[in-house]
């Protein structure tokens, strides 16, 4: 249980999600400017994202749990590790923070503040990739908490760094991030019309991870006698 009240936790969630999205969108813009090679641009997008996750989880985790992701908050709520009454507030804070992060990135690079992405990201392979990406993220978080809680920041940062490259969707794995990236017609963008299927796939991945975590991480010592 956090020692911080709900208002501080919500600000931490909004701030963390905002800085995460600002990093994803901003590094994507910078990478695209510096290189015409998509592989190089993706690398330039990947490294900052993994790095900022390590930083944000380390500094904001003690305040709010550092979810920065509605799919993660949902998983914690299902496991009764986040009060059900706080779930909606967490999600609203994350989405609002993510959208603000996109707008800040645009302002820094002197782009139109409000945009709608035209980048197509759709189809069963990409949807399945989002199921896989979110499943892996949620499983990594709970397994890390179970066995090496102090390592969670680096585990999550490294997982997302890897998942950028091994998933067909480049691993959004986060409904708030998907919504925010729909408002950026840049390298990191996704058409708003493609966002709902990404969100649905992410929630499926999260639920599958919760089911496996509930069984796999329950040792004989955890069972009631």
Image (cartoon, rainbow, N blue to C red):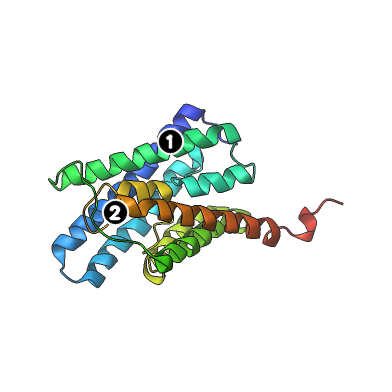
**Residue identified by numbered label 2:** 191
Q: Position of residue 85 (x, y in %)?
A: 57, 31
Distance between mark 1 and mark 2 Cα atoms = 21 Å
The residue positioned 35% from the left and 62% from the top of the image is 122
Question: Residue 56 has which mark?
Answer: none
Residue 43 x, y percent position in the rendering: 28, 67
Image location of residue 46, percent across then percent down: 32, 62
Is the residue 88 above or below the residue 169 in the image? above
Q: Is residue 33 visible?
A: yes
Quadrant occupied by the N terminus: top right
Callout 2: helix, strand or loop? loop
Instruction: Tell me the number on the disc at residue 92.
Output: 1
Residue 54 can be seen, yes or no = no
Q: Residue furthest right?
A: 225
Quarter-wise, where is residue 210 in the image?
A: bottom right
Image depth: mark 1 or mark 2 in front: 2
Q: Quadrant of residue 219?
A: bottom right
Q: Earlier in the sequence, mark 1 or mark 2?
A: 1
In this rendering, position of residue 126 left or right of residue 148: left
For label 2, the crowd category at 10 Å Cα-Cα, with few meaning under 14, some 14 to 19 and many 20 or more, is: many
Residue positioned 37% across, 52% down in the render: 195
Q: Nearer the viewer, residue 135 or 64?
A: 135
- Of residues 193 and 36, the one nearer the viewer is 193
Q: Is residue 191 above or below residue 8?
A: below
């Amino acid at each position: 249980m956090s020692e911080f009240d709900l208002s501080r936790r919500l600000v931490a969630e909004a701030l963390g999600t905002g800085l995460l999205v600002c990093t994803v969108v901003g590094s994507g813009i910078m990478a695209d400017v510096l290189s015409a090679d998509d592989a190089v641009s993706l690398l330039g997008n990947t490294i900052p994202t993994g790095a900022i996750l390590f930083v944000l989880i380390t500094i904001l985790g003690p305040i709010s749990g550092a979810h920065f992701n509605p799919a993660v908050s949902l998983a914690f709520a299902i496991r009764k590790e986040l009060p059900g009454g706080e779930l909606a507030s967490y999600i609203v804070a994350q989405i609002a923070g993510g959208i603000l992060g996109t707008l800040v990135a645009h302002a820094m690079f002197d782009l139109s503040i409000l945009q709608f992405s035209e980048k197509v990201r759709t189809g069963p392979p990409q949807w399945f990739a989002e199921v896989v990406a979110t499943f892996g993220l949620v499983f990594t978080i709970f397994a890390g908490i179970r066995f090496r809680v102090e390592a969670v920041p680096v585990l999550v940062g490294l997982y997302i760094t890897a998942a950028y490259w091994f998933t067909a969707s480049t691993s959004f794995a986060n409904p708030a991030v998907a919504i925010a990236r729909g408002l950026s017609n840049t390298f990191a963008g996704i058409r708003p019309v493609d966002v709902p299927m990404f969100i649905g796939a992410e929630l499926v991945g999260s639920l599958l991870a919760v089911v496996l975590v509930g069984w796999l991480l329950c040792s004989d010592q955890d069972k009631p006698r």
